[in-house]
Amino acid sequence: RQVKRVENWTYDDTHDEWICAAGRRLTFQGLKQARSDNGYWATLRVYQAHDCPTCPLKAECTTAEYRRIQISP
């Protein structure tokens, strides 16, 4: 199971957070407008983790300081 794939994570709809494979929470940061490959605009929900530097799975998940994901509702 790939730890960096969002499909392997859990969404907590009560708190509007994603829980990664290591059990860390990514909190909602805001909305972002992005154009898709076919030219349509979409609103993406942006989530970010805040404790990646101490995570034992960080090397398998991200090279950035903190993991950030964008979800299309």
Image (spheres, grey):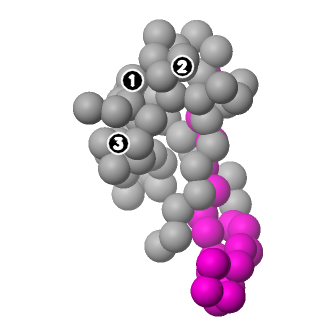
- In space, the residues marked 2 and 3 are separated at their CA atoms by 15 Å
Q: Position of residue 35 (x, y in %)?
A: 70, 79
Could you tell whether 46 is left or right of 71 in the image? right
Q: Which residue is mark 2?
A: 58
Dot 1 amino acid type: Ala
Q: So how many labels did they put on this image?
A: 3
In the rendered image, residue 35 lying in the magenta stretch gets the answer yes
Is the stretch drawn in magenta largely helix, strand or loop? strand
Dot 3 amino acid type: Trp
Residue 67, relative to residue 35: is it above or below? above
Residue 72, relative to residue 20: is it above or below? below
Secondary structure under the numbered disc 2 in the rendered image: helix
Q: Which residue is mark 1?
A: 22
Mark toward the viewer: 2 or 3: 2
Q: Which residue is mark 3?
A: 9
- In space, the residues marked 1 and 3 are separated at their CA atoms by 9 Å
Residues rendered magenta in the picture = 31-51
